[in-house]
Image: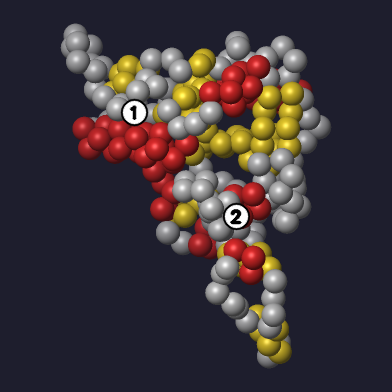
């Protein structure tokens, strides 16, 4: 892995992150969102129903007794509890031209959904960055790549539906939040994250001895 990237449509939000504001949303925030790429009705769970989202009415049956007029329902797979989320994209070196094309297409889509500005943390600084984040909270902080599956029974905080695989997500999971909580967790580091986070660096991947890059990331809309 080369490092991790986080895209922004508002440069001030990127600057705020670099200045030391570590902003984490809840699974319910993503379940309620209607924004393309952000919205996931089943974030961190097996299934969710919300009447106020306009979901089709459901009936719950328990021991032969039908329960109707349900305002909300969240079903979970066993495993991690719901946590506050801080999400990035994992940037890996593509092994084939097919993977390179897929990477370029995925980044173009991420830029269209989240914005052209971006933060970048080099792979060798991720652990140090995590250690700093851990000093800002008494909650446990874990991190890693998200898996993707076409089976809802696999989904949870560390696994999402395969339709989101283009996001190549790398996420921080912090503490345990309530199922219906929408209030974010905001951690602040007075010294700022300049030591770890680069702002809009030009990232180039090319074969040794060749001038033309296989891949490059800039704030331009094109990636190559």
Q: Which mark is residue 101?
A: none
Q: Which mark is residue 31?
A: 2
Q: Secondary structure at mark 2?
A: helix
Which x, y percent locates residue 33? 58, 51
Q: Secondary structure at mark 1?
A: loop
**Which residue shows up at 77% across the image and 36% down it?**
139
Query: Badge 1 is on which residue?
Result: 221
Q: Is residue 127 visible?
A: no
Q: How many marks overall? A: 2
Would you place residue 172 above or below residue 163 in this image? above
Which x, y percent locates residue 152? 51, 62
Q: Please name which of the two marks, 1 or 2, marks the residue nearer to the observer.
A: 1
**Which residue shows up at 32% across the image and 17% down it?**
204
Residue 72 position by quadrant: bottom right
Q: Is residue 71 left or right of residue 156?
A: right
Considering depth in this image, is 195 or 119 the residue closer to the camera?
119
Pointer 1 local density, CA inside 10 Å: few below 14, some 14–19, many at least 20 = some
Q: Is residue 125 left or right of residue 114?
A: right
Q: Are marks 1 and 2 in contact (CB under 8 Å)?
A: no
Considering depth in this image, is 210 or 193 the residue closer to the camera?
193
Q: Is residue 202 visible?
A: yes
Where the C terminus falls, by quadrant? Answer: top left
Which x, y percent locates residue 71? 70, 71
């Amino acid at each position: 892995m080369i490092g991790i990237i986080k895209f922004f449509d508002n440069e001030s939000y990127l600057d705020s992150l670099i200045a030391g504001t570590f902003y984490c949303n809840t699974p319910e925030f993503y379940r309620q969102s209607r924004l393309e790429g952000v919205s996931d009705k089943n974030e961190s769970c097996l299934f969710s129903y919300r009447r106020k989202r306009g979901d089709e009415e459901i009936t719950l049956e328990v021991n032969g007794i039908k329960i109707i007029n349900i305002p909300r329902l969240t079903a979970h797979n066993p495993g991690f509890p719901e946590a506050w989320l801080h999400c990035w994209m994992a940037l890996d070196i593509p092994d084939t031209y097919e993977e390179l094309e897929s990477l370029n297409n995925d980044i173009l889509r991420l830029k269209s959904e989240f914005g052209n500005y971006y933060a970048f943390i080099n792979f060798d600084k991720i652990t140090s960055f995590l250690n700093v984040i851990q000093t800002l909270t008494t909650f446990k902080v874990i991190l890693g790549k998200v898996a993707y599956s076409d089976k809802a029974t696999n989904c949870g905080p560390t696994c999402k539906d395969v339709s989101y695989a283009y996001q190549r997500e790398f996420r921080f999971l912090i503490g345990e939040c309530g199922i219906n909580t929408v209030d974010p967790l905001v951690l602040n580091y007075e010294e700022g994250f300049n030591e770890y986070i680069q702002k809009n660096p030009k990232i180039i991947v090319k074969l040794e001895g060749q001038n033309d890059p296989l891949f490059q990331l800039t704030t331009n809309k094109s990636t190559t």
